[in-house]
Image (cartoon, coloured by chain):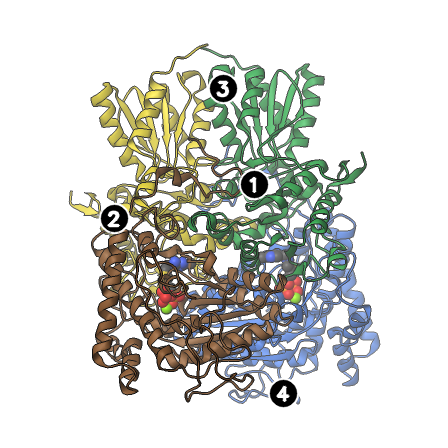
Chain colours: A green, B yellow, C brown, D blue
Amino acid sequence: MPEKTYREALREAMTQEMESDESVVLMGEDIGVYGGTHLITDGLIDRFGPKRVIDTPIAEGGFTGAAIGMAMMGMRPVVEMMTWNFSFLASDQIIQNAAKVRYFSGGQVEVPLVIRGPNGGGVQLSAQHTHSLENMYGHFPGLKVVSPVTPHDVKGMMLTAIRDPNPVIFLEAGALYGTKGEVPEGDNAVPFGKARIAREGDDVTLISYGRQVNLCLRVADRLEEEDDVSAEVIDVRSIRPLDEDTLVESVKKTHRAVAVQEQWRLFGVASEVASIIQEKAFDYLDAPVIRVSGAEVPAPYARNLELAAFPSEEAVASAARQVLYQEVEA
Amino acid sequence: MPEKTYREALREAMTQEMESDESVVLMGEDIGVYGGTHLITDGLIDRFGPKRVIDTPIAEGGFTGAAIGMAMMGMRPVVEMMTWNFSFLASDQIIQNAAKVRYFSGGQVEVPLVIRGPNGGGVQLSAQHTHSLENMYGHFPGLKVVSPVTPHDVKGMMLTAIRDPNPVIFLEAGALYGTKGEVPEGDNAVPFGKARIAREGDDVTLISYGRQVNLCLRVADRLEEEDDVSAEVIDVRSIRPLDEDTLVESVKKTHRAVAVQEQWRLFGVASEVASIIQEKAFDYLDAPVIRVSGAEVPAPYARNLELAAFPSEEAVASAARQVLYQEVEA
Amino acid sequence: MPAHLAGDGVVVFFTQNVPQSGKGTTVAAESQRTEEESVEVREEPSENGAVASADGEHLVDLYKKMILIRIFEEACQRGFRQGKIGGYLHVYIGQEAVATGFLDAFKEGDKVITAYRDHPHALLLGSDPKAVMAELYGKGTGLVKGKGGSMHLFDVERGFMGGYGIVGGHIPLGLGFAYAMRYQQTDHITQLYLGDGSMHNGAFHEAANMSGLWGKDGMNPCLFIIENNQYGMGTSVARSTAMTDLAAKFDAYGIENEKVDGMDIEAVLEVAHRATQRVRETGRPYAVEALTYRTVPHGAADFFEKYRTKDEVKKWRERDPIGLLEHKLLERDVLDEESLEEIKGEMKETIDEVVRFANESEEPPIEELYSDVYAGQDEYLGEE
Amino acid sequence: MPAHLAGDGVVVFFTQNVPQSGKGTTVAAESQRTEEESVEVREEPSENGAVASADGEHLVDLYKKMILIRIFEEACQRGFRQGKIGGYLHVYIGQEAVATGFLDAFKEGDKVITAYRDHPHALLLGSDPKAVMAELYGKGTGLVKGKGGSMHLFDVERGFMGGYGIVGGHIPLGLGFAYAMRYQQTDHITQLYLGDGSMHNGAFHEAANMSGLWGKDGMNPCLFIIENNQYGMGTSVARSTAMTDLAAKFDAYGIENEKVDGMDIEAVLEVAHRATQRVRETGRPYAVEALTYRTVPHGAADFFEKYRTKDEVKKWRERDPIGLLEHKLLERDVLDEESLEEIKGEMKETIDEVVRFANESEEPPIEELYSDVYAGQDEYLGEE
Ligand SMILES: Cc1ncc(C[n+]2csc(CCOP(=O)(O)OP(=O)(O)O)c2C)c(N)n1
Ligand SMILES: Cc1ncc(C[n+]2csc(CCOP(=O)(O)OP(=O)(O)O)c2C)c(N)n1
Ligand SMILES: [Mg+2]
Ligand SMILES: [Mg+2]
């Protein structure tokens, strides 16, 4: 299989769908003439023209709303949120219109819309440009929310997203746009609602998504080496719908779990994961599910502070050891 | 102690603080001349004049941002969000500026700001006007989020909110504006970060906030009558900071817990509560923490559907029975 | 033919096939009327231009529509006070000429979108008044199955794209429709209704700007119709902006604009056909500010109105659009007092029947709670 | 006295006590110059009006400031390429005359707010360039302790209220400052800087409208300064709006406005003093669109510029504000080539020292991660 970057895989999925379906259009700030600030859409305006690759003013709410309108008319807009940090400005459109208009119209319309862009921290982007919004959008019925981490999945899930008749919040691992991985040619559509077992193991389950999956994989290697512990790593990848079964099955096997997220602790994905596991695998758990999250502070700029704010290998390894060697009463 | 409505208690707190501190001003849509759509601010423009009771255009982002600016200058604005459903339009200002400007200015400014208004469902307000946003705002460091349910607490927590040097998201139980309760004259400031034990009990802990506290109290009575079960009811009331200790202590006593919320299940407050309890009281739990939430649908208009969408006494009672009579292995 | 008010058993009484012979009012410079058309006004205005004035029959038709709206809205207010209608209810009383006039220029395939004061738009597009009322009553026979209520009427088949409750939030959607209609190479347009109060919201600004921009390439046939009823809730235009010429605000977006007396159905009609035609032909947006007034409180739950004087309301009532039209009909000997009363009487009966239907309909089945959340295979992702 | 660039050991070289004798350019009609002032321009412009043209010494002072900015910004670009500066970095090269001119009219107590292209504003208000550079280097000696970086400079003591990264998001804050300053009964004003691209965002619209509205009661002394550098990232003004007269957009809010050649420091100076005075006196907002150009890429990480031609950049470079000012200084015999070179040479040394300071400073202590989250007792609510 050819190796491609995350960026190329993403572009490939969009290009493929644009070629096969005229109703697919791209919209966003500087995605056309400028080439896309992350070069995801580079070259596409030359290929598909400005009516299908639409540069917009800096008006996140306005163009997201317009895209919802297009989707209600049967088009399939793929909107670039230059970064998800700007999406608060579009959150009214996303949550109040995209997520709900099908319901409050009594099913008279569909909203086949994808909103995509980089999510999570980068390098020193500081407080206003560092957010992980999977829990925020994942909370609202009517939306689907996904967060692929491999080049394979970003292509496959984008294919699925564009074909889905519902609004999809597509959270890219922005920090990994340049990373390579195997990506099949053609159609590798990845269904939503299925977690991926990124590494099999028996002793403890590390649950994560986005770039923290790579962190968990590194920790798993380390646990193997240093503790002779076999860790299973699960890439949740679909935030809504959430694949509870795969999580629960894994924990039934390992009896111990750590949930890792870059986002803040309160009301985050890890809390949901812990909550589901204790509910559905209560009798299998040999230790509480421990969460590892970002520090409860707005993202700082200085690199040393920033590194301390993101989940680290040490923090995940230590959480794993905590659940592994915990004395259990009762 | 005099009985007052929730609405009166709220108005009393604001009036008191306005009288004692010139820097306190009110802002919002139709809070002045019109009297406030929920009559919370009725009469205050006559008393304090239009420079302190500021009617705004329909521009949630704009006036919230302006209030942040005022707060940075040492004023203490209390902003009415006519309902929290409109706050998505201000979420960029709230999350990107109010919550973070102190941090990214290296501590050079404070934002003593209160944003208040009704949260949660009413009667048939339907999809766009029915949201419980405590988890959404509660996720972000830099904000404080509270959700008082009694007239006593709404006054006491508003006093605390106005005096707090930080931005406070003040979520009122809009459906209860007309309900009465004892409210002391003068200063009954209620500290943030302390949950309230609304009813003591030994067998199971029902954890909730906002109007669901009343629901839990009714269920507790019913469990007492029908099952001879003594339920403890905890009113979380402070969402961020969250009083983990009170929850954990209660569960260490009862060994069983149900978390109830009107909001949707995924990434909600109940998930956080379950997650904390399983982490901190793992060895004390005799059953998994069960969550009762709103149906995973945008709020419907028809009354029968709406009632089915909100948590019911039956659902809470049945969850309590589930954790009470669960067979526990291990 | 306008299936219009043709609900099950509801009398259809609007004139069909209204010939449009010019009768005095100005014809837009760039358009010309063809001779002797006998097309339906609502469905197909003149091929290549605006209508001039409406003839008598046409006016009677419009009168009936306005009466329908008025009596329907009054019935809603009663239903609300009786506790039959819940949630928020906003009626169109006093503003009838605006939607009635503009929708006279509606052509099949066009799209209409508005905020929450949306009953007339549905009714005028031909939604069954029974289904509309049943919606407000929260019944399964409702226009959107009881799921949306007063603020969320939809009749997509007839071009009505809703019905939205967040002030300003629907505006960007309207441009999207307009873009799509050109992208799909049709000559349809969006009629986008908005309130005076919504214009100070960011959503309006972003949308209007993009509409103007896309219009440069002929990609935004969007007619902005400002229902300037002088207030956003209790806040007058002058208390919400320092620059109160709302039409002129569109200058900032390169969108041509004008004002019209929204109480005078003939004036509305003239601009409606002219502007609609122009937008259709150019693919560029256009804005019309209709000056009107709601002679009732903002919402049905409002019980006092500190923000305006009785006197002011009274003055505007003197220019009530229905009163004005009655005056014209009488003056021009199109109808006499008796026929006016007759029309109202018939309409009352119709609406009584509508209310009865709504009242007697069943609540939606509980399974409806879980449907329409998602399209496709996964309608519901929760439990049970 | 302008503590200005008086960082630890950094040479202070701006002239203090600049007399302002009119020299040719127009004086605003409504204001008159007093005779022979020897106040500091930046701190106290003429008591009752605008300055006219700057005299030679003043121009030299401004020249030094512009050179400071230019050389500082170039050092930033190098730091970025060397990996010493992280995150997003946006420099002001080509636009120097705008902030330099407007901040000449700054009076103590005034507030300044801008977006992320914020280095010059801090420097001109007198922030220590060492602290500014250390901030960009992510050091504990930084202006905001290394917590904010390039986009979030603050120096509240000197009136600099930041430094914001969300386009348009800072605009409403500026009105709030302005309201507060009147509420607190001072005669201070806000200088609110914004980009051309931000004007199509809802935040701008809502804020400008409220500013105009509050200004009617004299409650919004806010000077909007549009840094129209022709592009928002890669999108030209003409590709972001159909109505490209940005100053005139303020008409929609009842805010008077004008344009100025933002490359000509004297022109900027004239309008800056006049407009500032006017806003101060009336408590009403005013808007000035400064036509300028960034002759460098949008952000330091941008490596190609498909959206504009080299030729276009070249043409604007011919009107480089520093070049234009040098031309004036030479032509008027205020300075000769040699002194220009000397000034630049000194400034380079200064900036070398600034860079050395930033480079050698320590990273912030790790405890800083947890401070400044909340004010008051609960600085940190997380664990550890
Ligand atoms: C974003 C938002 N803010 C506030 C409200 C509450 N609200 C409902 S209607 C209304 C007034 C709108 O006025 P206008 O646009 O003039 O429409 P009208 O009601 O006069 O038809 C307000 C403030 C809302 N629904 N949405
Ligand atoms: C709301 C928002 N959308 C998008 C961005 C990304 N972005 C950063 S700068 C910029 C261009 C802004 O242009 P302009 O206002 O003209 O300022 P300039 O950079 O030219 O000084 C954009 C789109 C952002 N920071 N915030
Ligand atoms: Mg109105
Ligand atoms: Mg620009």
The residues bearing labels 3 and 4 have C-alpha atoms spaced at a distance of: 83 Å
Q: Is residue C180 above or below residue D322?
A: above
In the picture of the structure, the residue carrying the numbered disc 3 is A281
**Pointer 1 or 3: first along the chain:** 1
The answer to whether tags 1 and 2 share a subunit is: no
In the picture of the structure, the residue carrying the numbered disc 2 is C360
Q: Kindly identify the residue that appears in the image at 32 percent across and 21 percent down.
A: B321
The residues bearing labels 1 and 4 have C-alpha atoms spaced at a distance of: 64 Å
Q: Between residues C143 and C251, which one lies in front from this camera angle?
A: C143
Residue C59: image x %, image y %? 35, 78
State left or right for residue D257 relative to residue B203. Answer: right
The residues bearing labels 2 and 4 have C-alpha atoms spaced at a distance of: 84 Å
Quadrant containing the C terminus of chain A is top left
Q: Identify the amino acid type marked 3.
A: Ala
In the picture of the structure, the residue carrying the numbered disc 1 is A145
The residues bearing labels 3 and 2 have C-alpha atoms spaced at a distance of: 48 Å
Q: Answer few, some or many: residues within 10 Å of disc 2's Cα (few below 14, many 20 plus, some between 14 and 19).
A: few
Q: Quadrant of residue D181?
A: bottom left
The answer to whether tags 2 and 4 share a subunit is: no
- Between circles 3 and 4, the one closer to the viewer is 3
Q: Identify the amino acid type marked 2.
A: Glu
- Between circles 2 and 4, the one closer to the viewer is 2
Q: Between residues A99 and D192, which one lies in front from this camera angle?
A: A99
